[in-house]
Amino acid sequence: MLAIVKLGGSLITDKRKPFKVRAKVLKRLSSEIKEVLDKSKTKIVLIHGGGSFGHYVASKYVGREITSHGFIEIHEAMIRLNSIVLKYLRKEGVLAETVHTSSAFTLNNGRISVANIETIKGMLGKGITPLLYGDVVYDVSKGFGILSGDTLAAYLTNTLNAEMIVFTTNVNGVYRRYPPKRGLRDLIRVIDLRKLDLELRESKTLGYDVTGGMLFKLIELKRYIGCRKKVKVFIINGMRKDFLKNILLGRDVKFKTEIRVC
Ligand SMILES: Nc1ncnc2c1ncn2[C@@H]1O[C@H](COP(=O)(O)OP(=O)(O)O)[C@@H](O)[C@H]1O
Ligand SMILES: [Mg+2]
């Protein structure tokens, strides 16, 4: 089985503090990934988010054109985070190697137009766990644009024909309203993407209060995955010990949001 795992920036860094890595979480997640690779036949493509590295540096370009200097600055921050993530994975014994997003992908008006999938496939075939990350990349019509880890996750699930996609975050899944008023009772256990009219952004009328990061994941899943019955999509809390491991091993976890794409 092939699984795409997104390590959320909110999980591996502390988004409130610039350049703050959650080292213990990263170490534990790396060892859970190692255990899954050892215990099962599952292959994994890893993607990490920007957290308080990429998002922090990129925030000054919101609503503005990303300059060439900006491109380098954001990329620099992401390389720093990426090398830390890679270091932890290797320390725990995962044979991981980075596929640098800005070298392997090109956008055209925000949509992926070039993707070097062969490299990723080749690595997987050789027993390597490819590691990608959300980053700023060249956009043929705009100059530079952000290719987020969420978009990469949805895109690669489709192109690599993955059977599972797991978004690990710092929350228990998607809540009806955020912050939740009734704790886990506000957690949406299953979201049917066919019933969610994201074009209209009518999350309010559906009773969902999904903003920013969470809504974006659903939009990208809907855009890239289409109707593929086989794929299982989960949003889980990576702060919880063994949740990532168990879900990848096909076991249930206490709480999660499952996304039905079809
Ligand atoms: N309805 C919601 N349910 C859960 N989280 C939400 C919701 N709306 C907003 N959020 C916020 O979205 C965050 C997760 O998105 P994000 O930070 O983009 O995750 P990632 O780490 O994958 O990038 C949560 O930490 C939470 O603060
Ligand atoms: Mg995000």
Image (cartoon, helix red, strand yellow):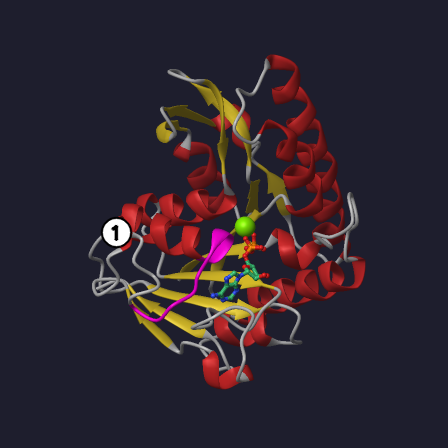
Q: Is residue 108 left or right of residue 177?
A: left
Residue 58 found in image quarter: top right
Q: Residue at x 61, y 63 (%)?
A: 33
| Label 1: few (<14), some (14–19) or many (≥20) C-alpha neighbours in 10 Å | few
Q: Amino acid at mark 1?
A: Leu
Residue 170 visible in the snapshot: yes
Give the main secondary structure of the magenta stretch. Answer: loop
Residue situated in front as seen by the camera: 260 or 156: 260
User: Horizontally, is 230 left or right of 245 in the view?
Assistant: left
**Does residue 44 show up?**
no
Q: Secondary structure at mark 1?
A: helix
- Residue that protrudes farthest toward the front in the picture: 205
Residue 174 percent coordinates (x, y): 46, 69
In-front residue for pair 150/94: 150
Q: Is mark 1 within 8 Å of ligand 1?
A: no
Which residue is painted at 72% across and 50% down in the image?
Answer: 90
* Residue under the image location 47 percent in, 72 percent down: 175
Q: Is residue 10 above or below residue 131?
A: below
The spot of residue 253 in percent (x, y) is 51, 82
In the figure, residue 110 lies in which quadrant?
top left
Q: Residue at x 42, y 18 (%)?
A: 142
Q: Which residue is mark 1?
A: 200
Task: State the quadrant of the N terminus.
Answer: bottom left
Look at the image and give the residue range highlighted in magenta: 206-214
